[in-house]
Image (tube, rainbow, N blue to C red):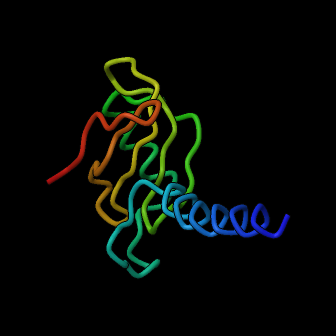
Amino acid sequence: MKNILQKTTLAALILIPMQVLATGRMECEPVDKANWMTEAALQEKLVDEGWKVRRMKVDGGCWEVYGTTPEGERVEAYFHPATGKKLLVARRGKILFRAD
């Protein structure tokens, strides 16, 4: 019984850091909140480019957007908080675009 408990504890300690690392796909450089694009401004920019925005939130210091690309793909995308530059686009765990 003690051996099973030790193995379970060890497995949990190994898996917890992996789960923490897997929660965010992107981390942006720190930008003062006063310099961020507003949610409305970024949404307007994306819509003008042909995106359909379903939901937006802040994640990893970036704007994280769930929506549809101009090409019609439903994706999760990350944008720079101040410039609105596209940084990462992923679909179902597969990275479709990553800025240099």
Q: Where in the figure is residue 79, as x and y percent of width and height?
A: 36, 53
Asked whether, in this view, residue 67 is left or right of residue 90, the answer is right
Q: Quadrant of the N terminus?
A: bottom right
Q: Quadrant of the C terminus?
A: bottom left
Residue 63: which quarter of the image?
Answer: bottom left
Q: Where in the figure is residue 72, as x and y percent of width and height?
A: 39, 17
Location of residue 66 with respect to 50 vertically, above or below: below
For the residue pair 63 and 97, the one nearer the viewer reads as 97
Residue 47: which quarter of the image?
Answer: top left
Location of residue 65 with respect to 58 vertically, above or below: above
Q: Residue at x 46, y 77 (%)?
A: 33
Asked whether, in this view, residue 8 is left or right of residue 33, the answer is right
Q: Residue at x 63, y 69 (%)?
A: 13
Q: Where in the figure is residue 81, as x and y percent of width and height?
A: 38, 64
For the residue pair 47 and 16, the one nearer the viewer reads as 16
Q: Check the image and name the residue furthest to the left.
A: 100
For the residue pair 60 and 65, the one nearer the viewer reads as 60
Q: Residue at x 57, y 34 (%)?
A: 54
Tally of numbered tags = 0
For the residue pair 7 and 26, the one nearer the viewer reads as 7
Asked whether, in this view, residue 31 is left or right of residue 11, the answer is left
Q: Where in the figure is residue 61, as x and y percent of width and height?
A: 45, 68
